[in-house]
Image (cartoon, helix red, strand yellow):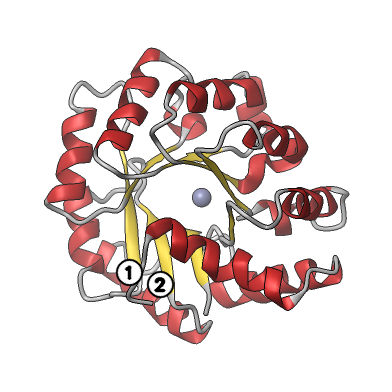
Amino acid sequence: MIIDAHVHFDERIDGTAKGAANELARQIVEADITRVIALHLEYQRWSPEEVAEAISPHSNIKAFVNVHPEHPNSARVVRDAKERLGFVGLKLHPRLQDFMVNSKATVSLVRFAGEIGIPVLFDAFPDGTHLMQGFNPFNYADLARQCPETRIIWAHMGGHHVIDFMMLAKRLPNVYLDMSYSLLYYRGSSVPMNMVYAMRSMGFERIFYGSDYPDRPLLESLQGSLEVLRTHGIGEVELRKLLAINAINFFGWDDL
Ligand SMILES: [Zn+2]
């Protein structure tokens, strides 16, 4: 069984949310993946309603809603997305949405997500833009420390800051990591080795597989990631935790 805990919708299929969801569902079957978490993005053209409707025929696609923490109605949008539209989490993207990770507004919205029982996924990839915006692992930790009742996923394992993020996650029991994008982006550098080190150091707990599709086709990401993980000596028992069990337990998917 495989869970891909970090994918997006591809706007290039036919421009519709339905077309993107159908293509994603086709690739899920092709790659023999059991279920994915798809992340709605405000900067794409579709509303939460459109995304919810597009994924409604596909039980193998669950979604996180994306809102700006400084939006005056952000909490209401998140509650509505969960209760009326069936979203299972909140996605926040400090780089694209250009907000401070540990601002008052972010703390308030992330606490609210915890109160209504949904996790929050943060983009934590330090590309040049994000570094120039002041990317700092401390801000992520500070936010998590201020929201102890909310389960928080640091996506991409913090990129080349992976060791910092690992050391912080060890002090923050409400923090989880996903390996999407970074594992393949940094291939050929020391970063994948550090990521595997971090996985081992955390006992292969609190870490999920993700692809960041449509960065690459789902199957290509899965095969490439498995190759990197196996090359670094990760065994089948640990792979099952990283690729399925950790995410299934996290989301409480008893139906799988
Ligand atoms: Zn992503």
Q: Using residue 190 as the reference point, say whether residue 128 is left or right of it.
A: left
- Local secondary structure at mark 2: helix
- Local secondary structure at mark 1: helix
Q: Could one spot residue 227 in this view of the protein?
A: yes
Residue under label 2, please give it.
24
Kindly identify the residue that appears in the image at 41 percent across and 72 percent down: 35
Q: Could one spot residue 11 in this view of the protein?
A: no
Q: Residue 93, image x and y in percent?
A: 46, 36
Proximity of marks 2 and 1: CB atoms separated by less than 8 Å: yes
Residue under label 1, please give it.
21
Residue 243 sits in quarter: bottom right
Q: Alpha-carbon neighbours of circle 2 within 10 Å: few (<14), some, or many (≥20)?
A: many
Q: Amino acid at mark 2?
A: Leu
Viewer-proximal residue among 227 and 177? 177
Question: Is 194 placed above or below 127 here?
Answer: below
Kindly identify the residue that appears in the image at 62 percent across and 73 percent down: 240
Viewer-proximal residue among 89 and 168? 168
Viewer-proximal residue among 98 and 102? 102
How many marks on residues? Answer: 2
